[in-house]
Image (cartoon, helix red, strand yellow):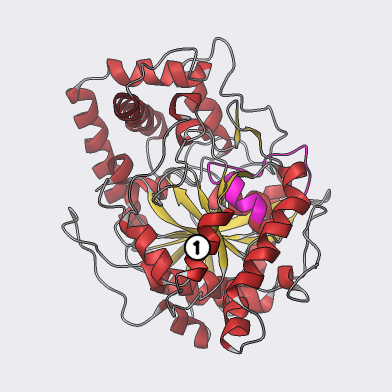
Amino acid sequence: MANVNGYSGYDGLGLAELVRKGEVTPAELLEDALAGIDAVNGALNGVTARIDDMARAEIAGGLPEGPFHGVPMFLKELGVQARGTPSRCGSKLTEALVAGEDSELMKRFRAAGVVTAAMCATPEFGYNPTTESVFYGPTHNPWDPARTPGGSSGGSAAMVAAGVVPIAHANDGGGSIRIPASCCGLVGLKPTRGRVPTGPAYGDWLSGYAAELIVSRSVRDTAAMLDAVQGPDVGPPNVIAPPARPYLDELAGPPRKLRIGWTANPPSGGAVHADVVDGLHATVKLMESLGHEVIEERFEIDWAHYFEQLIVIWTSYVAWAIDGVAKALRRAPSPENLERVTWELYHHGCSLTAMDMQNAMANFNLVSRQTGAMFERFDVLLTPTIAQPPLTLGTLDQNAIGVDAREWSRQVFDWIPFTPLFNTTGQPAISLPLHWSPDGLPIGMQFAAKLNDEATLIALAGQIEQAQPWRDRKPGIFYKT
């Protein structure tokens, strides 16, 4: 029995407003979220651990009067640390790992007033744009259970898309906020590098590639959460420019007329599915109808060399992360506690030298400069988020026999050639649910802006949401209240 009539139709700020008006209590909203897990998780397998007692204790202890006061939220089991919760990174190796303290981001989530109600699935150590680890089992897409919800924040995205919670934690080292947002029909913003703190455990997490935030069903929830958590913590390696005004204020009116570059051709030169290209062309027409200047562009980076450096960045991180948690747990990494491809990634990362990393970081700088020069020609770049609609589960198998680090990376980046560039440059990029394939699969469109310019992306996203709203689209698996 739902405590809120139409609970799953509200966004996070909408639920918080009901709490402020006294129409519902945080405890009642929590019970709605837990009932949602009961209703859909058997089909989706997005929630990996329930923390009902901890959530009830949060409420009993008194919640801060933040913008999301009383709103239930789920956490991904990778990245953010919430004291006392499992932090298993989708791996048998780390099955006993429990967070010992709140990270700075978790403290800010709590200050925003959320109630942390459950933990969500991720692929093993996050190096997979789908979410189907051996440890958790596959997570299914609520639009088509045979398809992936994307990754690595696929558990979070599946549960938000299915109406169980309005927002969920996600992070992005190569597209892992934007990819599942595209696959599940959600809003997914990767903020500028350093905008959201990753401390105290990490500074430039994944050599600066990784960023933290949420997936949501509305632009205003994303803007309000970015307002709540942005800004440096104590002692970060870099501090970036603060916003001129709250991001939520950017939704008060339409953006200025923008010069928007667009391309259907990924920097890899690879193929893009016809349904994705159709969605891009429709979005270009939408931008023109909103009064923006739209011009076709092209990437000018050496993908072959860049790809080799992506392998260095990612496998060195995977190896470092595995070694770190293994030592903390006094366990040895082995084929018995790691998936087959992860074992290959681990060994490749361990084989790299300091010179390999220096070369990768030099390419990091070169690509950032080349991309920055592109953005001198326009305000925003529009591309598809991913190259194909959501893949059938099993297509990207991190436990496959005979797949080495290079082949695995090729498979991964063939599907997601548009997203990792902005992890390299640190620029903000957002995926919006603007297209559906003829068979009903969500296809997101990505908008990227200059460093520090989340404001333009949020203002544009708000204008697009009003012009082509998506909130009434519901997947087949949905928590109906």
* Front residue (pair 360, 197): 197
Residue at the disc numbered 1: 57
Residue 27 in sight here: yes
Question: Splitting the image into 4 quarters, where does residue 289 fall?
Answer: bottom right
* Front residue (pair 359, 373): 359
Disc 1 residue type (three-letter): Ala
What is the residue that sits farthest to the top in this orientation?
Answer: 402
Question: Splitting the image into 4 quarters, where does residue 44 fall?
Answer: top right
Q: Secondary structure at mark 1?
A: helix
Q: Quadrant of the C terminus?
A: bottom right
Q: Position of residue 34 (x, y in %)?
A: 67, 58
Residue 152 within the magenta-colored segment of the rendering: yes
| Residue under the point 60% across and 54% down | 181
| Residue under the point 46% across and 73% down | 63
Relative placement, left or right, of 288 versus 304 is right
Q: Tell me the magenta residue range.
A: 142-159
Q: Position of residue 458 (x, y in %)?
A: 48, 72
Dot 1: within a 10 Å radius of its alpha carbon, few (fewer than 14), some, or many (20 or more) residues? few
Relative placement, left or right, of 140 versus 386 is right
Q: Position of residue 359 (x, y in %)?
A: 22, 30
Residue 175 lies, with reference to residue 346, above or below; the image says below
Residue 27 lies, with reference to residue 300, above or below; the image says below
Relative placement, left or right, of 210 versus 120 is left
| Chief SS of the magenta region | loop
Residue 390 lies, with reference to residue 213, above or below; the image says above
* Front residue (pair 116, 351): 116
Q: Position of residue 129 (x, y in %)?
A: 55, 38
Question: Splitting the image into 4 quarters, where does residue 291 fall?
Answer: bottom right
